[in-house]
Amino acid sequence: MHSSLVRKMLKARLYAEEPDRLTITGYTASFRGDNATHTVTFEAAEAGSSPESGTWACTCEYFLGRRTCSHVMAAQDMRPVMARRHRRARVPALIPLWGPRMGS
C-alpha cells in the first residue's frame, strides 16, 4: 500500500472523529413505496442554516398536488435515526504493510 494512501486513511479517521466538519446541504434517496419507487430529495436553504429549513420534494403524484406526502414525512422522521447510526466513529481498516501480498 502506498504511504500516501495510509496518510489519507489516517486523516479520514481524524475527520470522522470531528462530525462538525461536515454539513449536509442536500440529498437524494430512492424510497420503495407500496406501489412504486419514488425519489425523495432535500436541498438546504443555505449553508449553516438549521436542518429544518430547506426544500423537500418527491416524485409521487400526491406530493405534486399537496407539497408533502408519506415518503417525505417518513424521510423527515428517519433523520434522527440516520444521524445516530452515523454518529459512531468509523475507523477505516488499515491493511498491514507487511506479510504476504494478495495474489502472490
Image: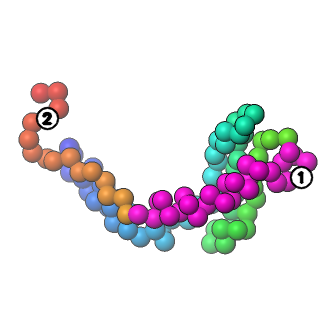
Q: Is residue 57 left or right of residue 103?
A: right
> Residue 50, image x and y in percent?
66, 72
On-image quarter of the C terminus: top left
- Residue neighbourhood size for the residue with mark 2, other residues' Cα within 10 Å, grouped as few (<14), some (14–19), many (≥20): few
Q: Residue at x 76, y 46 (%)?
A: 58
> Residue 98, image x and y in percent?
9, 45
> Residue 71, image x and y in percent?
73, 49
Q: Are marks 1 and 2 in contact (CB under 8 Å)?
A: no
Magenta span of residues: 62-88
Query: Looking at the rendered structure, which numbered label has been put on residue 88?
Result: none
Label 2 sits on a secondary structure element that is loop
On-image quarter of the N terminus: top left
Q: Which residue is mark 1?
A: 66
Q: Residue at x 68, y 59 (%)?
A: 76
Q: Amino acid at mark 2?
A: Arg
Q: Residue at x 13, y 35 (%)?
A: 101
Instruction: Answer whether residue 4 is visible to the viewer in this image.
Output: no
Of residues 50 and 47, the one nearer the viewer is 50
Q: Chief secondary structure of the magenta span?
A: helix
Query: Nearer the viewer's eye, disc 1 or disc 2?
Result: 1
- Judge whether 94 appears above or below 89 on screen: above
Q: Which residue is mark 2?
A: 101
* Residue lying furthest right: 65
> Residue 103, image x and y in percent?
17, 27
- Is residue 87 in the magenta section? yes
Q: Residue at x 73, y 33 (%)?
A: 36
